[in-house]
Amino acid sequence: MTLQQLRYVVTVAELGNITEAARSLFVSQPSITNAVHDLEKEMQLTIFNRTNKGVVVSREGEVFLGYARQVLEQANLLEEKFKNTAQAVPHFSVSCQHYSFAVNAFVDVIRKFDAYKYDFTLRETQTYEIIDDVANLKSEVGILYLSSKNTEVLTKLIRSANLEFRELFTAKPHVFLSASHPLAKKDAVTLEELEDYPFLSYEQGEYNSFYFSEELTSTMDRRKNIRVRDRATLFNLVIGLNGYTVCSGVISHELNGPGIISKPLLIDEYMKLGTLTHKGMTLSRYGEAYLQALQNHIPKE
């Protein structure tokens, strides 16, 4: 077993495709394939299950890759300590729902580990993909919310993927509105008051059921619905159409601008926001730093 083999299998796991991994590492596809095959044979395990769409990390492969990442992390620390530190290349990935505090914490980690070269990934993506990314080690940390509506379904998925949900904070539901919205001066708003305005939500692809919705009130019937993929589009429509979306209420004017405000939504619900990580897997120093950075950007009681 070599460090090169470990780097190969970790990259394949992150990209989910041997061809993409070869392109990323600037080596030939047969080199990656042979390295993976030799490592699986030596360790007497199946790291990847092959499919017609690529490769999927096996259950025993998840455990192996957890240890492999730790070995590579320690090797990087040794190189930084005793070799040219400018050659160290930090790698870290997060998958999350669309939360400004998650972005701000990610920025903190990049600033802390700024180097001549680095490879960081922040995926603001669909709920099911967050679970899938962390389960298949494409991301080290995931961030999503649980409520009375989705806890049972999502908890089963999280447990079946051998993941662990750890609460960061519990928020009362809020709405994001334009600062010039007709309801902007109210201390709090009701769903009845919002009836005439477009409801904006994040599209969830083939898993577009209310269990995977990023917005708490997605089960309710509305006359005006708009689904989008990204944060910038959503906020542009909030401002341009006097629309609204349901959220945790945590807002960053640096990211969202002064045109977006947050107002409490008068509804008997909660949003329990937390992190997803592999159960029993030791986080890298980047993962640990990210969890610490999150504490600086979440509401304090």
Image (tube, rainbow, N blue to C red):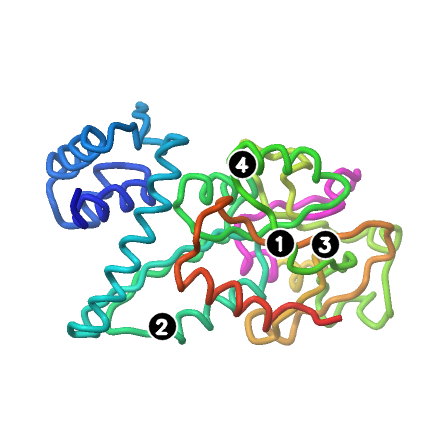
Label 4 environment density (alpha carbons within 10 Å; few <14, some 14–19, many ≥20)? few
**Which residue is at the front of the view, 65 or 156?**
65
Q: CA distance from mark 1 to mark 2?
A: 24 Å
Task: Look at mark 1 in the image and give the residue it sits on.
Answer: 274
Kind of residue indicated by mark 3 = Val
Label of residue 113 in the image = 2
Label of residue 205 in the image = 4
Q: Is residue 233 magenta?
A: yes
Residue 214 place in picture, x, y as percent: 64, 47
Q: CA distance from mark 2 to mark 4?
A: 34 Å
Which of pointers 3 and 1 lies earlier in the amino acid sequence?
3
Which of pointers 2 and 4 lies earlier in the amino acid sequence?
2
Task: Look at mark 3 in the image and give the residue it sits on.
Answer: 246
Label 2 environment density (alpha carbons within 10 Å; few <14, some 14–19, many ≥20)? some
Label of residue 215 in the image = none
Residue 180 place in picture, x, y as percent: 74, 71
Looking at the rendered structure, the secondary structure element under dot 2 is loop
Kind of residue indicated by mark 2 = Phe
Find the magenta span and give its range.
215-236
